[in-house]
Image: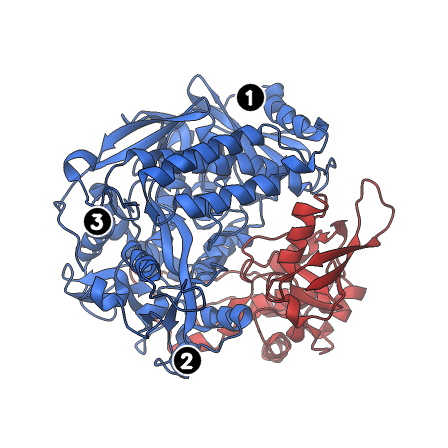
Chain colours: A red, B blue
Amino acid sequence: MDVKLRILRFNPETDRKGHWEEYNIEADPDERILDLLHKVKWFDDGSLAFRRSCAHGVCGSDAMVVNGENMLACQVLVKEVSNPIKIEPIRGLPVIKDLVVDMETFFESYKKVMPYLVNDEVPGERERLQSPEDRDKFEDTTKCILCAACTTSCPVFWTADTYVGPAAIVNAHRFVFDSRDNASKQRLEILKDVNGAFRCRTAFNCTTACPRGIQVTKAIEDVKRETLTIN
Amino acid sequence: MKIIKHSFDGVIVGAGGAGLRAAIEAAPHMKLAVITKLYPTRSHTGAAQGGMSAALANVEEDNWNWHAFDTVKGSDYLADQPAVDILCKEAIDSVVELEHWGLPFSRLENGKIAQRRFGGHTVKEGEAPAFRACYAADRTGHMILQTLYQKCVSMGVTFFDEFQVLDIKIDDGVCKGVIAYEIATGDIHIFEARAVTFATGGFGKIYKVSSNAHSLTGDGPGILYQKGIPLEDMEFYQFHPTGIYRLGILLSEAARGEGGILRNKDGERFMERYAPSIKDLAPRDMVSRAIATEISEGNGAGPNNDFVYLDLTHLGAETIKQKLPDITDFVRTYVKIEPIDEPIPVQPTAHYAMGGIPTDVDARVLSDAQGTILPGVYSAGESACVSVHGANRLGTNSLLDIVVFGKRAGQSMVDYVSSTKPFSLSENAGEDLKNKISNFIDKEHDPNFSVAKIREELQDSMEENAKIFRTEESLTKQTEILSDLRDRYQNVTISDKGKVFNTELLEAIELEYLLDMSDTTVASALERKESRGAHSRVDHVERDDSNWLKHSFAFKNGDSVKLDYKDVELGNYEPKERKY
């Protein structure tokens, strides 16, 4: 089938602002959007810049806006989107080139919530025990691949990038509800801050955008509720 | 193009499981930098699914000697047995350590780490499939990568994200540092460092149908090979039996560990004929060959008889949801099939390099078949060849390899740095790379010599001539094709002349590594006139221990490959016929 691809291009070395370019491509309906971007890059315009690696939705490199919605380009097939296909960089982060954005603020926010297990007790020679039920409490939020699809779909984040954003809260949730962790209180103090979980306005964009199917808004609500338990 | 200089004691190239594990070991003891061409969490360790074996004996009786026996037998007796002992013995503490750092393993009712069956892993040296693979649903690699990165964040490890190392400086046989290209700016960075670990992963992109990420282009092995360091056992490349038809996306062996069955077009469970005792849980080389044989004998399914089915329909919705959520989602996403109700079309997919940069058990890089150590250079994970996987790796042993030998690489860096003095690397150390880049930028673009065209022909021809079954004829033909591609590569051009995110430039440089990996794979395969593990010669079908119980070392010799050999280190297990 013939597909029209409209890509928002921006080259900081030659352009003052972004502009749309159109590419006509012969595509198989079962191909991924990422495959189309590769066709443009490999056989038409080598300067097209985008990130990608695993090409099957687990590395989190290729979040972008496709026909207005955040998704991973490698996880959506041509037949699932309407033609022409409009592709833009994810929003709220500075564009470096074409579909590549500066991820630094995103990862800084992630690091703010202490995204690691804290437990100073000597664990012994074997594994700590954890019941399947306790393990289940944070199962959903372990799936995060830090692709930024949620955070950059959030209207609050668009207006204030100081907001830690859904992805950071998801990663806090992963430890707050882990029975082996001892630093929930510190994490929740961080998330009580003006730029923490309470900036969420439950727009649910993040939940829709998550390519891993994480119930992001629910995780944020869980964290908000948990902050009420600390003094 | 600016040139910026940094001074570190140690540098780790690559931030997948092996690189991060090495970093955790080394960071407290030196000024350390981890350099990655991706963001750490994008590394392909995150795509590993099924598990990580260790004889924890949480489900049934087990001990690490049985694990070692299985690994050696799985390797078709090419693995070095002292190294295998280390792998299997240290597996237990490595899993426990990851748990202590927060890895969310799936759990048994009693709260211990859950374990499942996997191909080639047995109890009592072959008696029955063993519950040995520790797992976190079917995203064990993701959890390992996340946990190791989280640990690095907590330790404040220094990362250079989206910097691609493209050169190493070795003066008088001693490592002096690496040269990297900053992807966002096009600047060149000189990293002075006396200890350098390459943990750059595999090179599955030499094949067309592959489970590997686009980024897996053999950078570390390529950089060292171009400097005269040999690559070991390159003829042994693993094809995973169950890639999604045509796409190659991995469907974990855990699917069969949980009871999944392979069927041909008639619905026959054909593995009963190839491996009567452990059937679908035979090692990967045997299952991939069985599938290829079924297909070549006309028993494949579909209009072209070119795939078989992975049948999970009898497992039930609950098991699939609890234990195989990700891979079944891949099937829904990419094939639009519901695995609870329908069997999945699969075919073997290029998956894992048993070969790579030769190292000893302390991850120290060897510069020849005689065991000469290259001071200050280390490698771990898929980029390295210790060799613990020999001619065929068992499933789950790669995740083990990255933590066991990643840690050892870190320890070796510490030992070396503490016993040597800092030095200074000259300001013009970046000149070679600068010239290489300038050549690409200055050369006028000619679409007939594009990176994509040469790479596509490379992948298609490797798929055709150097995949599961090989012959003298197919490999000779491939040698000629590679020589032609190499000639054309000399004239390769790029259209992007910019500095910012010029990934076309990087793809052009990576293509040379892919050619290096292909050259060494084909040359080593052509010379090895026997069938062992993943290397199947139709014209030499038997394993030949009297002539070939040895590792190959492929050296760059101008534009051709020169081979040398090193005897396998045996141990407790004498080579025997390999039956399952």
User: Can you say whether A203 is above or below A48 in the image?
Assistant: below
Q: Secondary structure at mark 2?
A: helix
Q: Is residue A45 visible?
A: yes
Q: Rate crowding at label 3 as few (under 14), some (14 to 19) or many (20 or more) other CA atoms within 10 Å.
A: many
Residue type of the residue flagged with mark 1: Leu
Q: Which residue is mark 2?
A: A133
Residue density around tag 1, few if under 14, some if 14–19, many if 20 or more, within 10 Å: many
Q: What SS does tag 3 mark?
A: helix
Q: Secondary structure at mark 1?
A: loop
- The residue located at (66%, 30%) in the rendering is B440
Q: Amino acid at mark 2?
A: Glu
Kind of residue at disc 3: Val
Residue at the image point whose x is 70% and y is 34% from the top: B446
Cα–Cα gap, marks 2 and 1 = 55 Å
Residue B349: horizontal and vertical position, in percent?
A: 42, 56
Q: Position of B237 compared to B224: left or right?
A: left
- In the picture of the structure, the residue carrying the numbered disc 1 is B425
Q: Residue furthest right?
A: A16
Q: Do marks 3 and 1 share a subunit? A: yes
Q: Residue at x 73, y 45 (%)?
A: A45
Chain where mark 2 sits: A
Mark closest to the chain's N terminus, 3 or 1:
3
Q: Nearer the viewer, residue B274 or A127?
A: B274
Residue A62 at what x, y percent from top left? 63, 57
Numbered badge on residue B455: none
Q: Which residue is mark 3?
A: B72
B26 above or below B281? above
